Amino acid sequence: MKKVVYLLSLLVLSALLLAGCAVAQPAAPAADAGAPSAAGDVTLTYMASQGWIKDAELELAKKFEAETGIHVDYQIIPADQYFSVLKTKLNSGEATDIFGGQSGKTDLQVQYDVEKNAVDLSGEEWVSRHDPLSLEMVSLNGKVYGAEIWDTIASNYFIVVYNKDIFAQQGLSVPTTYAEFKDVCLALRAPGISPLYEPVADGWHHVLWFPMVGPRFEELNPGLAEQLNKNEVAFADVPVMVEAMTQLKELYDLGCFGDNALSDAFSDANAKLASGEFAMAVTTLTTPVSVEADYPDTPAQTFGFFPMPLADNMLAPAHPAGPSKFIYSGSPHIEEARQYLTFLTTPENLQYLLDNTPDFAALNFSGLQAKWTPEQQEFLDAYPAKSIVYQDAVNYLNPQWMDIGKDMVAMFTGAMTPEDVLKSIDQRRADMAKTANDPAWAE
């Protein structure tokens, strides 16, 4: 009997040992942590400034979700608050999976600290199709950190759009100097026409007048941008910069920007141009097409273009930097975000974005069909683009854009002089350069 019990015990023990061995076998390899999650269980968050996300991109996001099950949640922040909100989120480690930002080396380093906060995208296929100048603006120390999917010509060249019919009725010609431009404004005011719509309330638009004429500063002072970057000269020490800022103040004082410039908003620009209430506006080459789309009774051919004439500028404002998309390095969905950028940058989807965005005429990727109008092509043929604008060419300028806007308002209202504004720009540049340990500012 004892022998039987003993044998039964051995059998039970053997069974237990076999079971234990089975449990101890290595588990099947887990799914790659970097691979996209199963469809339907991921939402990508994407924060951007107002105006950066076009309706066609929202439609592409729906298509992406239909194909992958990955939802894209766009979080749009007012332009005057955006960079403050973004920096807060980056500093607290709570940024969205994808965040928007203006490109440019200084912005990448100072505003976003991309080497810490963004994912290296250098190995992505679409990099080889990206315009080289745009690619440089989203790169830092040899690595690509962003995708700049933007019209860097038609939507980035901020110039004066004018109503050809109004000019003809008033016997006015396109100005070629600042003095002629001022005379045009005064001639328009005489019969009660508001000369130029300049919306200051947004905080950013009126700043365009200064760095966008950077090519003229460079034309008159060859190598000036490089001297500024080496800290060999300051903004306040450059006579043509003082002249340009003083002329801008004069235009405001003469009422050239209308009676409500400080409260006007850029979102109303198309309506103001379409109504004929204003004869001009500083906006983009695609604005007439956008006006016609919003107001079919005002054809795009109604409008022509010329450069912003401060300091007698007659150069096109080449501007390869623009709103770009960065993947947050702390995102739990990095691979899904990569997947979305890959989706957006396929030629088919880029062409859809271009074809269905009225304020785009071209995109900065190869292999696409542009849609220039005769008037746009006429401008590009008539006005050379000799160098890039100063927010792209000069370090530590673009990151202080909204602060410059506040200083300009103070100048318009008499609290600061043009020289004060330039000195304030210089001080902020110095502060940012020292924070970045720029050797040109080492004491």
Image (cartoon, rainbow, N blue to C red):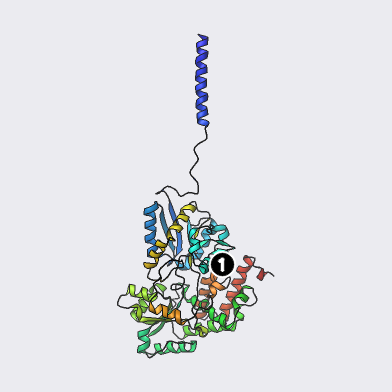
Whether residue 258 is situated above or below residue 110 in the rendered picture = below
Q: In which quadrant of the rendered view does residue 51 lie?
A: bottom left
Rendering coords of residue 125 (x, y %): 49, 58
Please indicate whether residue 293 sits to the left or right of residue 10 in the image: left
* Kind of residue at disc 1: Lys
Please indicate whether residue 168 sits to the left or right of residue 384 in the image: left
Residue 125 appears in view: yes
Rendering coords of residue 162 (x, y %): 40, 82
Judge the density around disc 1: few (<14), some (14-19), many (≥20) Cα neighbours within 10 Å: many
Q: Residue at x 33, y 78 (%)?
A: 299
Whether residue 241 is situated above or below residue 100 in the rendered picture = below
Of residues 344 and 389, the one nearer the viewer is 344
Q: In which quadrant of the rendered view does residue 217 lie?
A: bottom right
Residue 259 appears in view: no
Q: In which quadrant of the rendered view does residue 276 lie?
A: bottom left
Of residues 390 and 237, the one nearer the viewer is 390
Of residues 46 and 34, the one nearer the viewer is 34
Rendering coords of residue 152 (x, y %): 47, 71
The residue tagged 1 is: 105
Of residues 81 and 219, the one nearer the viewer is 219
